[in-house]
Amino acid sequence: MSMTTPLPRPKNNARVAAVSGFVGSALEYYDFFIFASAAALIFPRLFFPEGEPGVSTLLSFSTVGVAYVARPFGAVLWGHVGDRFGRKRALLACLGIMGVATFLVGCLPTWESIGVAAPILVVMLRLVQGASAGGESPGSSALTMEHAPDGRRAFYTSWTMSGVMFGIVISSLVFIPIASLPEADLLSWGWRVPFWASVLVTALAIALRRHLEEPEIFEETRETEDVVKIPLWELLRHHGLTVVRVTLMTLFTGVNTMVNMFVLAYGTTVVGIPRQDLLTIITVANLVAVVVGPPAAALADRIGRKPVFLAGLVLQAVSVPALLRAVDAADLTLVWVLSVFVIGVAYTLSNALYPAYFPEQFPARVRFTGMAVSLMLGLVLAGFTPAIAQGLISAPGHERDWGTVAGFTIGIIVVSGIAALFAPETARVPTARLGLRDTDPAVAPPVASPSGVREG
């Protein structure tokens, strides 16, 4: 093998990548989810014509969903950049674009000022947010996983997902005092403040991301000229079945938007639960998820990905209907307990380990693209889950029919579980062999020789 000049790298690259993944994802998804909170609480009254409250809420939820439609296109773009030119470059671009789009949402005039142009502008900026988010968590997951040592990949990559959940916590915390403002202040300037604050959020995230290193396995791929010119074509030609499988496994993420958005809107507008109470409950539930995620992922490193992933799905299928029934009954004590269990424990058992499990299905040369495209295709349904649920309970004769919503949610969880049963177990596979067939040559990780020269 050829001898090459060593690349200076810190010894704690995995920790640096994990911390960067946590902070970067938290700040990126703060931007992404303050829109979701506003869509549930504020936007129906600001950006859509007055009429039936359920209709305006449905339209507002649809603006959230369009971002998930844009995410697969963003996944193709950022996957191409990440697999060809580097994970770091793609991640920095995602952050900058998300920050600008979020700030501009806070500057938009309302329906009262410019009429139908208002929701059109909201949708356009939401599409930009979606395209940006299409590369964030997949890129961060792939980068951290490739830095992590064998046997601890799920633990290190779980910090990226804990960062996403912490971003939801921050966005909810911001809206608790905003939601308590007098109605006139809330609808005039209060709702804009969280969006304007994204300038500071974005600057901090970019400063942290600039210190990232590219994973050694990616550098080896580049040095051996194994970089794919068109990663999407390579992915679809040789890994199409894997894309379908991972996409279906992703469908369980609809549980997240179901609780964080539909339950918030249904509980406040239909049942009459104070919005501050539900915002506080959602904040605590997601904060528990931040803490539970790394231990759950560490368990997946010890006993395997499948048992932990599937256990989480089973618990979600049992507990989500109970949560919806508790919300409909306005039983705040039970809503507290079940929300924390659903998001903080059941959902997190599956959610915390997929940043390792999903990219582990693909080889390094198309890993960013494979993870991004599969994940974002699956998240399209998650994005429209609140709108679908709202449509189900808005249908004539089905008002407050939470059982129909529960059945829909259980259905997507079951599909995720069936797909996972056919996925290979990857916990014990060396990083260099992930996503490869038995006949494929592995990319050997560089080893430092006694003279300090890196050997390929």
Image (spheres, helix red, strand yellow):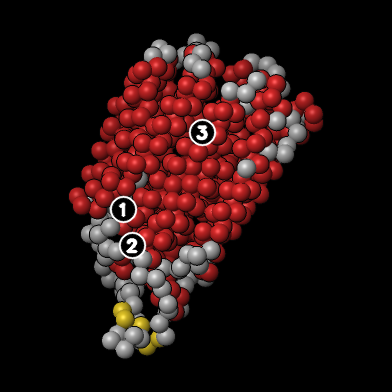
Question: Within 10 Å of the Cα at label 3, are there few (<14), some (14-19), or many (20+) other Cα atoms?
Answer: some
Q: Quadrant of the N terminus?
A: bottom left
Residue contact at pointers 2 and 3, CB within 8 angstroms: no
Q: Could you tell me if residue 160 is visible in this image? A: yes
Does the CB distance between marks 2 and 1 fall below 8 Å? yes
* C-alpha gap between disc 2 and disc 1: 9 Å
Q: Looking at the image, is 154 positioned above or below residue 167?
A: below
Separation of residues labelled 3 and 1 (CA atoms): 27 Å
State which mark lies toward you, 3 or 1. 3
Q: Residue at x 34, y 77 (%)?
A: 446
Q: Which residue is mark 1?
A: 155
For mark 3, what is the residue? 173
Counting from the top left corner in percent of width and height, residue 154 is at 31, 53
Q: Secondary structure at mark 2?
A: loop
Residue at 60%, 28% (x, y): give it: 178
Kind of residue indicated by mark 1:
Phe
Query: At numbered mark 3, what does the secondary structure look like: helix, strand or loop?
Result: helix
* Viewer-closest of 333 and 382: 333
Residue drawn at point x = 53 percent, y = 50 percent: 134
The amino acid type, in three-letter code, at marker 2 is Ala
Pick whichever, 189 or 260, lies toward us: 189
Disc on the earlier residue, 2 or 1: 2
Mark 1 neighbour density, 10 Å: few (under 14) some (14–19) many (20 or more)? many
Instruction: Name, please, the residue furthest toward the right.
Output: 114
Mark sitting earlier along the chain (2/3): 2
The residue beneath circle 2 is 148
